[in-house]
Amino acid sequence: MNVDEQRIAEAMKQLRHKGRATLHDRLHRVRMAGGLALQAGLAAGLAYLVSHKVLGNPQPVFAPISAVGTLAASVGQRFRRTVELIVGVAVGVGIGDFLIYLLGTGPWQLGLVVTVAILLTIFAGASVAIVIQAAATAVLIVTLSPSTQNLEIPRFVDAFLGGGIALLVTAVLLPLNPLRVINRAARPALDLLAAQLDITADGLRSRDRASVQQALDRLRNNKEELAAFGEAIEGAKETVTLSPARWHRRSELTHYAEAADPIDRAMRNSGTLIRRSVTLIEDEEPVPDTMPDALAHLAESVRLLKHEFAVGEEPNQARERALRAVSEAGRAYADGVGFSGSVVVAQIRTTASDLLVASGIDQEDANRCVRSSFGDLDRPAGSPAEPDGGKPKPPTAPPVG
């Protein structure tokens, strides 16, 4: 096989790998949105049915639109979204009706109504959602009023009805399991972190600067994963607040909410760790065998944390593996490292502490366990040794599930 054929084969291999990754990502997004799709469909159908059959609206367009608009809002902000819909509709109806009464209808009146609606809502300090809703309602009032009489009250009632039914569906009729939502949202962030730590470990073993740099670039581009995780937590809080069927999940949700910040810190500290690993390779500093091993244990700790969260187990295995990573980092430090290597060791300790806190351990106890697992290297001369030969004993934390 000549050079060109090798390049073509490699390109085809990369395309196949990218295609599989893209399909996996898309299927994951579909699974994440499956519950929302069912809620939106049910809310739209119920809103139409109630508006048409109960309230006698011959053209119940606004009720299902309002229901879907509420559910399409950021998870965790649906109650606020309903209020914004109603306020925006009220403003749009008032401005549209008043200007139609004074000026009549037509293209320039439409433009003036929209302009005034936007400027007044902005002047009042309204949110972007209210501004948009007010402008859209004003457009509908101006364009539909000539052919549809008495549009104002049905529009306002339908907006209230649609938003209320959307909240009813999410809280009572079809509430999602908040822990399942969080588990699915946390998976991409934790998988990303574990994968990049593994790649960095392999890159240090082979001194492959390019692969470690790619891991750094990928980890830096983690805003989408972290945003999805944070949004899922807010949505879960909303669910356990509004849904009586999910009230018993409040204590478990508290644990997840407390884990969000340390996981975010673990991401950031791992970014510093990987960046220093790139510099370490560039400067040709020594890489003790235990340093990549420490990173591999850290990656495994992340995977164990994800698994034990998902199945509702106490994350003892994740804690033990995080402390093992610290222990290996201590051995690497004792074997001799350069300046960047010492930073990598320090960041292993810090990231392990973050993971311990994410698992439910108090920050002070997590720091004590890390110091103990690292060994006597950072203990001042003459200070007493840790009990039990310095072996760490992570304190117990409230059960996850």
Image (cartoon, rainbow, N blue to C red):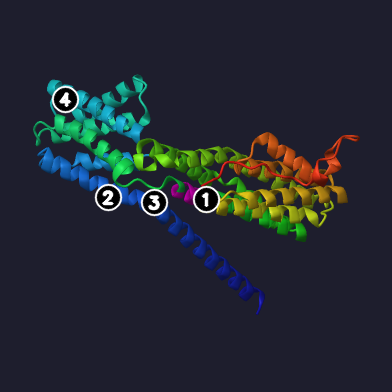
Cα–Cα span, label 1 and label 4: 56 Å
- The part of the image, by quadrant, that contains residue 125 is top left
> What SS does tag 3 mark?
helix
Label 3 CA crowd tier, 10 Å (few <14, some 14–19, many 20+): few
The answer to whether one can see residue 60 in this image is: no
With respect to residue 313, does 103 lie above or below?
above
Which three-letter amino acid code belongs to the residue tagged 4? Asp
Q: Principal SS element in the magenta part?
A: helix
Q: Which of pointers 1 and 2 indicates the residue nearer the eye?
A: 1
Which disc number belongs to residue 41? 2
Cα–Cα span, label 1 and label 2: 31 Å
Give residue 34's position: percent from left, percent from top: 37, 53
**Foreground: 5 or 17?**
17
Which disc number belongs to residue 97? 4
**Foreground: 321 or 116?**
321
Q: Please provide the residue range marked out in magenta.
A: 180-186
Which disc number belongs to residue 312? 1
Q: Which of pointers 3 and 1 indicates the residue nearer the eye?
A: 1
With respect to residue 231, does 16 lie above or below?
below
Q: Earlier in the sequence, mark 1 or mark 4?
A: 4
Cα–Cα span, label 2 and label 4: 32 Å
Judged left or right of residue 223, residue 392 is right
Q: Quadrant of the N terminus?
A: bottom right
> Residue tagged by mark 3?
33
Residues at discs 4 and 3 in contact (Cβ within 8 Å): no
